[in-house]
Image (cartoon, rainbow, N blue to C red):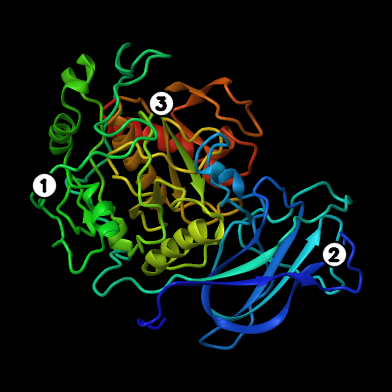
């Protein structure tokens, strides 16, 4: 990409590809040359409208001029969104969409959208971009949503010197896996129905208080890059001021002892007696900040929204395909961010954290990694939870061991801030969705997959099977 080109989105309305303009007609775009882009998705007007059809794309590589094979897009994606009764959902800005697909730098595109029963005359075997491309009952011709368009996203370049992704993370004090230990004694976790003490941060929906002054540089931290920071960039960076200086591109990892000391600093008297006597928390992992992956802070809404605590973590996959290198991840995240805010109409990127296949962890939605930021990741269960997305598609492909380990390290720390045991269950109240009615209290595993809270294939069968490993590893990292 060219460094002088900021991020941008091209929107191309889809048109009937057959002479039949009835509701069962095939929509799409004929092959065409477009401005350079790297990520795409199909968007429509009504976020509640279900796309019961098949979306296929092929693209032309900018460097070689070669066209790819047809690829499927995941058509069920809006279940990653805000809760139905939230201000984010009620803003009137939200739209329906497929999952985004990362295609790399491209300058040509062709699209076809078929109702469920449709099948093009020249149908080729396709590469599945998401792992789950077809929805709906076989043989049933369905009406496609209104206002369908193709959005082509150029993630742009980060500011000079930014984009801290690519290298594999090195955790301080990392060595052998913690030894197998006995299960914690009863009482180590708050009893069911009792809320763990809330974190330092505003209550749900409240504006954040003025942040405390920046902490001094932690050992192993990179030099902060303040440069010329906008007010929005300063606010996003200052949300982590208890952990790193303003402008930091990376939050360094801590040892177990340092993390326990930091827990007291962050939570203080809010800690339960059990947490004060024996804090079960995993060592803080290294995290690339929003400044590190080059977030354009003007895309998001200015304020931060918090929930009261974090009782569970929902694991997702981005369903964006696996054809990426770890050095490209900052660009991928900038693409997801622009797609979520500009195409789907969300207030910010939906996930609280993202993890790549090399095991690097990234800050997602702005507001502070140690704070209970309310995301838009599991419709109906965004309150009192955090959302972690592993970048890639894991319906048929296994996640890397590094990614699984990173999710375990992240959940051991994040859940440990709130006294939660990764191997236990907790009680959550549904905000409304297609699996649990609004107001229903649900017993959920503290580390759950997206499909546990919503009727979806996310996080893909192969990643979902690894969650038991994540739970056991996270518990060990916490010292349980």
Q: Secondary structure at mark 3?
A: loop
Looking at the image, which is closer to me, 351 or 148? 148
* Vertical comparison of 408 with 419: above or below: below
Q: CA distance from mark 2 to mark 3?
A: 46 Å
Query: Which residue is drawn at the image coordinates 60% and 48% (left, top)?
Result: 78
Q: Judge left or right: residue 43 versus residue 351.
A: right
Determine whether label 3 and label 1 are within 8 Å by CB.
no
The residue lying at 13 percent from left, 38 percent from top is 258
Label 1 crowd (10 A; few <14 / some 14-19 / many >=20): few
Q: Residue at x 36, y 54 (%)?
A: 359
- Is residue 358 placed above or below 269 in the rendered structure? below
Front-most of 144 and 458? 144
Q: Residue 81: name its quadrant.
A: top right
Residue 305 placed where, x, y %? 38, 40
For mark 2, what is the residue? 119
The residue identified by callout 1 is 215
Taking the spot 24% from the left edge, 39% from the top edge, the residue there is 209
Q: Is residue 124 visible?
A: no
Q: Residues within 10 Å of mark 3 (few under 14, many from 20)?
A: some
Tell whether 117 sits left or right of 179.
right
Q: Quadrant of the C terminus?
A: top left
Q: Nearer the viewer, mark 2 or mark 3?
A: 2
Of callouts 2 and 1, the N-terminal one: 2
* On screen, residue 94 above or below 72: above
Please tell me which residue lies in front, 193 or 123.
Answer: 193
Query: Closer to the N terminus: mark 3 or mark 1?
Result: 1
Q: Is 245 positioned to the left or the right of 105 in the image?
A: left
Q: Residue 257, how many percent across, how many down?
A: 13, 35
Question: Which numbered marker is on residue 423?
Answer: 3
Label 2, label 1: how far apart the Cα atoms are: 59 Å
Percent x, y for residue 337? 45, 59
Nearest to N terminus: mark 2 or mark 3: 2
């Amino acid at each position: 990409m060219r460094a002088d080109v900021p991020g941008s989105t091209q929107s191309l309305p889809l048109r009937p590809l057959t002479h039949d303009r009835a509701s069962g007609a095939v929509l799409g775009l004929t092959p065409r040359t477009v401005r350079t882009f790297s990520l795409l998705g199909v968007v429509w007007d009504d976020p509640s409208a279900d796309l019961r059809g098949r979306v296929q794309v092929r693209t032309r590589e900018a460097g070689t001029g070669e066209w790819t094979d047809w690829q499927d897009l995941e058509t069920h994606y809006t279940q990653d969104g805000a809760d139905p009764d939230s201000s984010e959902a009620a803003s009137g800005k939200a739209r329906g969409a497929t999952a985004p697909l990362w295609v790399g730098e491209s300058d040509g595109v062709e699209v076809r959208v078929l109702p469920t029963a449709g099948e093009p005359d020249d149908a080729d075997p396709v590469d599945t971009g998401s792992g789950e491309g077809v929805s709906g009952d076989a043989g049933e011709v369905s009406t496609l949503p209104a206002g369908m368009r193709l959005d082509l996203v150029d993630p742009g370049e980060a500011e000079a010197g930014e984009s801290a992704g690519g290298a594999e993370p090195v955790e301080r004090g990392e060595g052998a896996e913690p030894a197998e230990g006995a299960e914690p004694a009863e009482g180590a976790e708050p009893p069911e129905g009792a809320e763990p003490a809330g974190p330092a941060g505003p209550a749900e929906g409240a504006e954040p208080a003025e942040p405390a002054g920046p902490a001094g540089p932690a050992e192993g931290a990179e030099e902060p890059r303040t440069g010329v920071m906008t007010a929005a960039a300063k606010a996003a960076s200052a949300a982590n001021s208890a952990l790193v200086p303003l402008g930091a591109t990376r939050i360094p990892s801590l040892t177990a002892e340092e993390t326990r000391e930091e827990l007291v600093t962050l939570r203080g008297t809010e800690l339960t007696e059990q947490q004060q006597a024996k804090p079960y928390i995993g060592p803080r992992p290294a995290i690339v900040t929003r400044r590190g992956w080059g977030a354009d802070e003007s895309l998001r809404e200015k304020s931060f929204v918090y929930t009261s605590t974090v009782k569970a973590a929902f694991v997702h996959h981005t369903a964006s395909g696996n054809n990426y290198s770890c050095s490209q991840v900052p660009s991928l995240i900038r693409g997801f961010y622009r797609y979520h805010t500009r195409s789907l109409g969300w207030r910010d990127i939906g996930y609280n954290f993202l993890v790549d296949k090399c095991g690097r962890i990234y800050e997602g939605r702005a507001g502070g990694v140690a704070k209970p930021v309310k995301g838009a990741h599991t419709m109906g269960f965004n309150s009192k939870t955090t959302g972690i997305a592993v970048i890639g598609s894991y319906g048929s492909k296994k996640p890397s061991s590094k990614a699984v380990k990173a999710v375990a390290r992240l959940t051991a720390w994040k859940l440990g801030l709130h006294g939660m045991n990764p191997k236990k269950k907790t009680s959550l109240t549904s905000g409304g969705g297609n699996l649990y009615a609004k107001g229903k209290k649900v017993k959920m595993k503290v580390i759950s997959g997206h499909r546990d809270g919503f009727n979806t294939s996310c996080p893909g069968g192969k990643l979902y099977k690894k969650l038991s490993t994540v739970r056991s590893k996270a518990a060990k990292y916490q010292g349980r």
